[in-house]
Amino acid sequence: MTFYIFACSKDRTLYGATDEPTGAKLPKGACPGGTWSPRKQLKESRIGFSATKAAAAIKKQGYYFFHVKITTSIRTAPKP
């Protein structure tokens, strides 16, 4: 299966996967106040989430949602 990945414009941790390239199967209300924008097209062997769970959800409802954890660290340069 090929997964088409979309990002929510109002929540930078929320992503949706579907099996069609336009994102038409993603519920509009799942990205409140924002839009779904296309990010990637991935084959099953190259994804960072459970392909089995995603494929089952897509088969049942047309989409699969997942969150990514975004961490940042600020490092200061050592004093000379």
Image: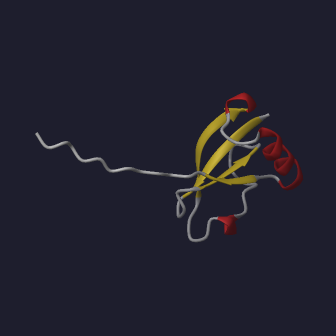
Q: Whole-percent x and y of residue 14?
A: 61, 57
Q: What residue is at 50 percent from the left and 52 percent from the top?
A: 70
Q: Residue at x 85, y 56 (%)?
A: 61
For the C terminus, give its image quadrant: top left
Horizontal and vertical percent position of residue 13: 56, 56
Residue sitting nearer the eye, 65 or 35:
65
Question: How many numbered tags mark residues here?
Answer: 0
Q: Which residue is pictured at 59% across the width and 47% down the height?
A: 38
Q: Residue furthest left?
A: 80
Q: Residue furthest top?
A: 45
Which of 28 and 47 lies nearest the eye of the viewer? 47
The colour scheme used to paint the residues is: secondary structure
Q: Position of residue 52 (x, y in %)?
A: 83, 40
- Left or right placement of residue 51 versus residue 40 in this view: right
Q: Among all residues in the image, which is located at the extreme right?
A: 60
> Which quadrant, please, contains the N terminus?
top right
Left or right relative to 79: residue 60: right
Image height of 17 relative to 43, above or below: below
Q: Is residue 30 above or below residue 42?
A: below
Q: Position of residue 27 (x, y in %)?
A: 73, 62
